[in-house]
Image: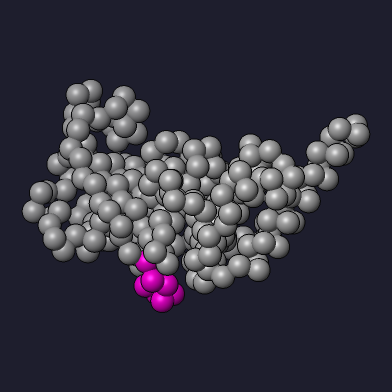
Amino acid sequence: MSKSRSKQKTLSQRLHDELAEMINAAEPGDQLPTEPELASQLGVSRATLREAMRTFETQGFLLRRQGVGTFVVRPSQVLETGLEVLESLDTIAARKDMQVSPQQENLERRKATDEECSILALPPGCEVVSISRVINSEERPVAYLVDILPEDLISPEEIDDDFTGSVLDLLIERGRPQLVNSHCEIAAVAADSTISRALQIQRGDAILKFSSRLFSIDGDVIDCTFSYFLPGYFRFHVVRELAS
């Protein structure tokens, strides 16, 4: 390893350790010094500081409010669950006595994209219903969930004041179409502008993304979902058996 790379690694580790020490010494709700002050105090550039702070932000230890400042937060509740059984985030949280609440919900009826037509087996030009919502925990957004369905699958009457925003729970309670399973891909992705605004993080921050397709008993994809989670507030696991 070159001397410059070794020095950079040492600087990065030192900065991480000093930030961790500062955060651990603070109380939840405490405000950190401004970026210029903190960079000067730690002897690094603002760009280097900002990059280091991203790690703590996505882990749920820092919350940056545009034009206000950076505040220390500390997740007191982490949702830990297995992925073997298909359940809504609301159902999992309720079972584990974790307090979560929808911050905002947006319903849109629009023309399906080519990709959505392909996934949902719809002819070009068809409309879909897009339902997105932000989930809060401890007064901060921790998850952003998007469901995309054929427009005739949910009636306007079902999207009323009693609708919680969970399409899965609505379909399970209704009993039709009969659901059978969900295929899910999990990846770490960089937050785009929409996700960063919804979760109050910086664009490009690493988050956990679940891309799922919900199948009916007839083999049709009836719901295409995209779920984005702040890693610091969620811990998922899978039980795996040894091969025979």
Instruction: Check the image and name the residue furthest to the left.
Output: 157
Which quarter of the picture shows residue 90? bottom left
Decide if residue 223 is on the left or right side of residue 183: left
- Could you tell me which residue is drawn at 16 percent across and 48 percent down? 154
Count the marks: how many? 0
* Colour mapping: one colour
Q: Position of residue 235 (x, y in %)?
A: 55, 61
Q: In this view, does 118 lie above or below 240?
A: above
Q: Where is residue 244 in the image (x, y as percent from the top left)?
A: 68, 58
Decide if residue 159 is on the left or right side of residue 63: left
Q: Is residue 242 above or below residue 95?
A: above
Residue 95 forms part of the magenta stretch: yes
Task: Let me know if residue 234 appears in the view.
Answer: no
Which quarter of the picture shows residue 222? top left
Q: Which one is in front, 158 or 135?
A: 135
Residue 232 forms part of the magenta stretch: no
Q: Where is residue 38 in the image (x, y as percent from the top left)?
A: 64, 50
Decide if residue 201 is on the left or right side of residue 46: left
Q: Where is residue 14 in the image (x, y as percent from the top left)?
A: 78, 51
- Could you tell me which residue is drawn at 54 percent across and 42 percent down? 205
- Could you tell me which residue is drawn at 70 percent across and 50 percent down? 41
- Could you tell me which residue is drawn at 56 percent across and 44 percent down? 206
Decide if residue 217 is on the left or right side of residue 86: left
Q: Which one is in front, 119 or 28?
A: 28
Which quarter of the picture shows residue 103? bottom left
Task: Let me know if residue 140 appears in the view.
Answer: yes
For the magenta stretch, what is the residue range? 92-100
